[in-house]
């Protein structure tokens, strides 16, 4: 402030005081503005945190109570930015549908016919002899018959196989004239996989299929046996399972070797509880690892127990394998694959789609009429699946060869992937990273090199759903039997799951397959040709 000459001392003191107060007010203003800015930042952060928590709550509620399907239509939005290949695939679909409609015949009314492979017991019904005389005086002739079918079921039946072995001896010389033969000769005892046990091959197969295919734990089977007058304790069944596990180890080794002879593996894992693990609490979380592999037409469903989810659990499965490994985005897979330069890691589009689908549901539940950006991402992903579905149908009909399938899929999907990647990079700078949509975008960009690799081999599909379907029987069973009593029990469960699910994957009845295997082992033991009882070598 410019000084004025000639003012009194009192006036100057007053001016100085005003200047000092003005400076203080300026500092106070700056302080208040800083505090306002800080509070505004806090309010913005709290609002974002509130939105994130509300979004997480909506996703959690959707996972708990919502429909499990991830079906997404999005036709109109897909056409807004759809590539030429997407439009062509839709036109082909319409053409194929048109051909189907052209030759369409209305299905006959009525129920579906009963499986012709089920045995028939023919019951013939006839009218009385008196009714076969016509009023005109002539005998009536049979001009045909009406046939109807009904299903009949016989409840579980069990019987005791009582074996009588005849014994022979010579009363004249009491065997002294034939020293090379025993004095008492007896018929040979039929083989049994568990020598000295009351359990036959068919009983063991019945028990194991009931537990591992029908999800019936041993304590429920024990009650079921009691209802038909048979005492078989759950402890007996557990002991039989452990003994059978030892008997089938050679067959399991062959299955694991065959698992790695194909060019593609799919792996997934799920938690399980195992009691009495060394150095661990009974409540510790262990894991069941599932692997789908083997050459086409000879698929192996392999289950393996490990105490952890770390990369050390994956390495024994990958040892000796060369080809493509398809998994979800769990970091342990990347860590394990650092040791294997001849294995190509392939990502899973189903996991990617699930994250965008949850983001879309959260947006809609939050008041948005549409899923916005999440719907756009889902439309891109749907384009990939549309191409896959159309080309797989052509390959199934023999219209294209595997080589042509591979080339056409790459040609059609590359523009969709390129457009999707550009969209992801643009949105990654615009969407809040901590939101559900931001996390989905970040996940997809991190997995992008692996997600593209499914185009490299005709056996590969966009997702890892084969492994997820394979692990589902274990998840369903886990709801009933809850835990394994010991690590050895967990390994024996894996063994039986592997045999049963591999048999099913190769078109065999699991009960009949297990019975065949158990009878064969009883007859041949370790010296037989174990290759002959692999599922694809039986009919």
Image: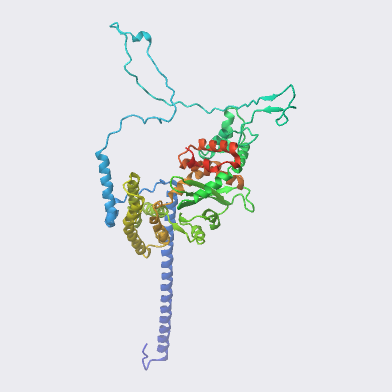
**Residue lying furthest bottom in this view?**
6
Q: Give the percent coordinates (x, y) of residue 447.
A: 42, 59
Please tell me whether residue 50 is drawn above or below residue 168 in the rendered image. Answer: below
Q: Quadrant of the N terminus?
A: bottom left
**Residue lying furthest top in this view?**
137
**Location of residue 197 (image quadrant):** top right
For the residue pair 437 and 342, the one nearer the viewer reads as: 342
Q: Give the percent coordinates (x, y) of residue 353.
A: 39, 53
**Location of residue 178 (image quadrant):** top right
For the residue pair 65 and 455, the one nearer the viewer reads as: 455
Is residue 463 shown left or right of residue 271?
A: left
Q: How many marks?
A: 0
For the residue pair 362 and 537, the one nearer the viewer reads as: 537
For the residue pair 336 and 61, the one nearer the viewer reads as: 336
Q: Give the percent coordinates (x, y) of residue 402.
A: 36, 50
Please tell me whether residue 27 is drawn above or below residue 460 in the rendered image. Answer: below
Q: Residue at x 68, y 27 (%)?
A: 185
């Amino acid at each position: 402030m410019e000084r004025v000459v000639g003012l009194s001392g009192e006036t100057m003191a007053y001016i100085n005081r005003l200047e000092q107060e003005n400076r203080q007010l300026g500092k106070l203003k700056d302080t208040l503005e800083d505090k306002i800015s800080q509070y505004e930042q806090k309010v913005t952060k709290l609002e974002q945190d509130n939105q994130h928590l509300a979004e997480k709550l909506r996703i959690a509620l959707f996972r708990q109570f919502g429909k499990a399907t991830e079906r997404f239509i999005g036709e109109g939005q897909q056409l807004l930015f759809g590539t030429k290949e997407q439009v062509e695939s839709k036109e082909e679909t319409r053409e194929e549908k048109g051909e189907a409609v052209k030759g369409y015949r209305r299905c006959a009314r009525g129920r579906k016919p009963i499986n012709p492979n089920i045995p028939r017991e023919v019951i013939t019904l006839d009218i009385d002899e008196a009714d076969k005389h016509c009023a005109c005086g002539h005998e009536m002739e049979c001009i045909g018959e009406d046939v109807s079918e009904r299903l009949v079921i016989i409840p579980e039946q069990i019987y005791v196989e009582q074996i009588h072995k005849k014994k022979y001896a010579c009363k004249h010389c009491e065997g002294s004239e034939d020293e090379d033969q025993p004095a008492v000769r007896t018929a040979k005892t039929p083989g049994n996989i568990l020598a000295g046990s009351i359990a036959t091959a068919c009983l063991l197969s019945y028990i194991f299929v009931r537990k591992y295919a029908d999800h019936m734990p041993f304590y429920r089977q024990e009650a079921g046996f009691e209802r038909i007058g048979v005492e078989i304790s759950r402890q007996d069944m557990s002991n039989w399972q452990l003994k059978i596990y030892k008997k089938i180890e050679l067959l399991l080794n062959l299955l694991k070797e065959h698992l790695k002879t194909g060019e593609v593996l799919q792996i997934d894992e799920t938690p399980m509880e195992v009691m009495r693990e060394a150095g661990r609490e009974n409540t510790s979380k262990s894991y069941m690892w599932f692997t789908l592999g083997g050459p086409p037409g000879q698929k192996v469903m392999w289950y393996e127990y490990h105490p952890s989810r770390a990369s050390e659990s994956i390495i024994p499965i990958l040892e000796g394998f060369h080809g493509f490994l398809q998994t979800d985005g769990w970091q342990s897979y990347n860590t394990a694959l650092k040791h294997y330069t001849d294995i190509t890691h392939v990502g899973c589009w189903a996991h990617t789609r699930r994250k965008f689908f949850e983001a879309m549901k959260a947006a809609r539940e939050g008041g948005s009429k549409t899923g916005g950006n999440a719907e756009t991402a889902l439309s891109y992903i749907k384009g990939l699946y549309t191409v896959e579905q159309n080309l797989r149908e052509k390959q199934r009909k023999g219209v294209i060869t595997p080589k042509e399938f591979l080339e056409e899929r790459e040609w059609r999907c590359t523009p969709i992937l390129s457009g999707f990647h550009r969209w992801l990079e643009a949105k990654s700078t615009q969407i809040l990273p901590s939101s559900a949509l931001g996390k989905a975008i970040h996940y997809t960009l991190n997995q992008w090199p692996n997600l593209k690799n499914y185009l490299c081999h005709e056996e590969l599909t966009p997702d890892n759903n084969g492994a997820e379907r394979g692990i589902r029987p274990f998840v369903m069973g886990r709801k009933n039997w809850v835990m394994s009593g010991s690590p050895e029990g967990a390994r024996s469960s894996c063994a039986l799951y592997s045999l049963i699910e591999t048999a099913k994957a190769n078109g065999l009845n699991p009960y009949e397959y297990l019975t065949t295997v158990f009878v064969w082992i009883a007859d041949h033991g370790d010296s037989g040709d174990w290759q002959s009882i692999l599922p694809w070598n039986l009919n």
